[in-house]
Image (cartoon, grey):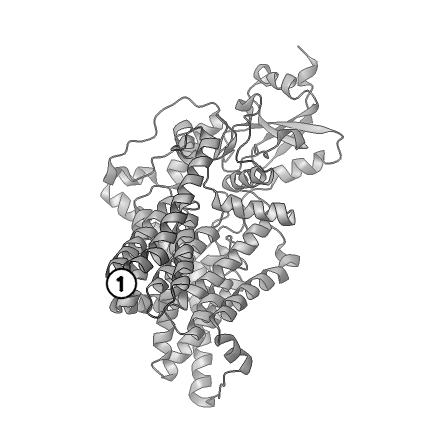
């Protein structure tokens, strides 16, 4: 694994202990001290406008992470997926959708990147667009993550305002800030779930507002446009899970459109027309992007990559009868080892039996629970879930949670951010549960609400909860950074040929990653394929000084290479 595993049991004990201690303090304070709490005037002013609450949440997210810059800094990419997203951002920042295949491209093959018919990332474009915005406007792609995560927290607050009173919606947005916008890997990497979660929050918040009585047609049109854009964000961030979340939303949209008591022409103009027009425009743009990258408007870069480098089936073979990875010849043994590592890490062999599959799904559920919920929020989330089941207006949140969870359960490969489209539903459940407890107007219940909020803040800031501790500490030294530092003072351009000790090397710790414009890169990273095969690089990259890097992930050797000086 790329990350150091967390001690989940210790974190459960720590969070539960803090929750218990905070509850005792809050209960004693409420029971015996009877503190008088009055709503400050500034808070009343904030809550008097939904927009002000949303802006406050985003401002807290931006300011909070900015204050952590001296401690946490700007993250450096370490994961293969991150480099693929950064390649996309670099491509877009060069004002193009794809790149020409580089000479001797077999030496530059890497994970999550297609080399032919063009050189491009396999991933959908939303994350790349966010990173490219940061790179173009601020000359730092991480600013795209920074801004999109703040927008996510604001969108969660805005969505909750459609279901809950303003104060509780504000609380939900601030809890999201603490969990995601400060120390979570969603904020501190280049491959988190902020864009997909943003799309989910906007989609749910827009569709439930669309058919509220008393709205003007221009207002409906704006909400319909927001709904359509949110669906496109889902389609271009996490298409599979985004589709699963979109199905109940589209069903709700269709049902409400049919039953709405609005004039037919006004309904078409205000709701259906914006969704259809924006949706069709998005489909056309996606097809154009596919054409520029894969050569076919119907062939997604992700599908092309799976055909070229098939690792694992996309769905569970026990249910859908998919066969294992075809034994196609691979261009490099690192890829073959990566396929074996993927199968082991994601429990592929377990999926062939009912007992193994049950154990795998229970493990996934536990990991996602630890990341999205944790001990402190467990009771509020459960109460909120039951409350939403009993209220017709809130059942749509239950539906999107079930469909998204089912989609993940049917997939073999699973990461924490795969559930991100339904993140807003988790916070709706949590805050609805807290609201229910508070409304009991008893010291015990209110003390528990206060304890939950204090605990979430404490364990998140101290990284003693899954939301901020998971995917946080790397298991390997940053070999790319070390090599780049050694070559920083070398004159001219460099080309580094990488060879691994495959007995020790973990293929997730890959060094061969490059930017979009090979000519402008100071350092190119390439795979060594033996001295004879490596010489084909001499003609295409004659202006570069060649180096050899050999590593087993612990030890690194960097030596000059006179590869091109001998026939």
Q: Is residue 477 left or right of residue 199?
A: right
Q: Nearer the viewer, residue 512 or 501?
A: 512
Q: Residue at x 56, y 66 (%)?
A: 60
Location of residue 77 in the rendering, given as x and y in whole percent from the top left corner: 57, 44
Residue placed furthest toward the top: 567
Location of residue 28 in the rendering, given as x and y in whole percent from the top left corner: 44, 84
Q: Residue at x 50, y 63 (%)?
A: 177
- Disc 1 target residue: 260
Res 222 seen here:
yes
Q: Is residue 17 left or right of residue 552?
A: left
Residue 351: quarter of image: top left
Location of residue 403 in the rendering, given as x and y in whole percent from the top left corner: 29, 52
Please tell me whether residue 475 is drawn above or below residue 104 in the rendered image. Answer: below
Q: Is residue 277 left or right of residue 521?
A: left
Q: Nearer the viewer, residue 221 or 428?
A: 221
Q: For the residue labelled by badge 1, is the local secondary structure a helix, a strand or a loop?
A: loop
Res 190 seen here:
no
Location of residue 121 in the rendering, given as x and y in whole percent from the top left corner: 50, 36
Please tell me whether residue 277 is drawn above or below residue 24 in the rendered image. Answer: above
Q: Residue at x 51, y 52 (%)?
A: 185
Q: Residue at x 38, y 23 (%)?
A: 328
């Amino acid at each position: 694994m790329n990350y150091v595993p967390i001690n989940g049991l210790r974190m459960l004990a720590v969070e539960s202990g803090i929750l218990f201690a905070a509850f005792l303090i809050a209960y004693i304070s409420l029971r015996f001290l009877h503190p008088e709490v009055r709503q400050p005037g500034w808070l009343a002013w904030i809550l008097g406008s939904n927009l002000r609450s949303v802006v406050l949440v985003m401002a807290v997210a931006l300011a909070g992470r900015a204050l952590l810059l001296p401690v946490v800094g700007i993250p450096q990419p370490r994961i293969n997926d991150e480099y693929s997203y950064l390649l996309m951002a670099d491509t877009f920042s060069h004002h193009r959708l794809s790149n020409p295949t580089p000479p001797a491209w077999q030496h530059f093959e890497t994970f999550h990147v297609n080399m032919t018919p063009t050189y491009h990332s396999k991933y959908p474009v939303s994350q790349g667009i966010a990173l490219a915005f940061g790179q173009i406007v601020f000359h730092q792609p991480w600013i795209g993550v920074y801004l999109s995560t703040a927008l996510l927290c604001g969108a969660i607050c805005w969505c909750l305002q459609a279901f809950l009173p303003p104060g509780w919606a504000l609380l939900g947005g601030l809890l999201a800030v603490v969990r995601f916008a400060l120390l979570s890997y969603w904020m501190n990497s280049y491959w988190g779930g902020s864009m997909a979660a943003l799309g989910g929050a906007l989609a749910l918040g827009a569709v439930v507002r669309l058919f509220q009585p008393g709205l003007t047609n221009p207002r409906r049109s704006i909400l319909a446009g927001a709904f359509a854009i949110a669906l496109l964000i889902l389609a271009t961030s996490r298409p599979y899970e985004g589709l699963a979340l979109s199905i109940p939303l589209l069903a709700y949209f269709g049902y409400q459109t049919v039953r709405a008591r609005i004039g037919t022409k006004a309904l078409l103009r205000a709701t259906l027309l914006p969704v259809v027009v924006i949706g069709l425009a998005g489909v056309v743009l996606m097809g154009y992007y596919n054409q520029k990258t894969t050569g076919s408007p119907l062939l997604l870069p992700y599908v092309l990559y799976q055909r070229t480098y098939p690792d694992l089936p996309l769905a569970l073979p026990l249910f859908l009868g998919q066969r294992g990875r075809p034994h196609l010849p691979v261009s490099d043994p690192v890829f073959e080892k990566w396929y074996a590592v993927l199968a082991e890490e994601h429990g592929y062999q377990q999926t062939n039996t009912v007992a193994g599959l049950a154990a795998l799904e229970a493990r996934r559920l536990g990991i996602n629970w630890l990341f999205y919920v944790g001990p402190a929020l467990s009771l509020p989330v459960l109460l909120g879930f039951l409350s939403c089941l009993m209220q017709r207006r809130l059942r749509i949140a239950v539906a999107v949670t079930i469909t998204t969870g089912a989609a993940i359960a049917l997939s073999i490969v699973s990461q924490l951010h795969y559930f991100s489209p339904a993140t807003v539903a988790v916070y709706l459940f949590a805050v609805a549960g807290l609201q229910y407890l508070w409304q009991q107007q008893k010291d015990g219940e209110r003390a528990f609400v206060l304890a939950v909020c204090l605990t979430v803040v404490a364990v998140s800031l101290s990284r003693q909860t899954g939301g901020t501790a998971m995917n946080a500490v790397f298991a390997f030294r940053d070999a790319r950074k070390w090599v780049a530092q050694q070559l920083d003072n070398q004159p001219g351009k460099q080309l580094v040929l990488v060879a691994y000790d495959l007995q020790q090397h973990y293929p997730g710790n890959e060094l061969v990653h490059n930017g979009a414009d090979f000519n402008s890169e100071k350092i190119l990273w390439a795979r060594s394929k033996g001295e004879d095969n490596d010489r084909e690089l001499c003609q295409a990259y004659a202006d570069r000084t060649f180096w050899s890097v050999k590593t087993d992930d612990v030890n690194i050797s960097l030596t000059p290479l006179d590869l091109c000086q001998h026939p």
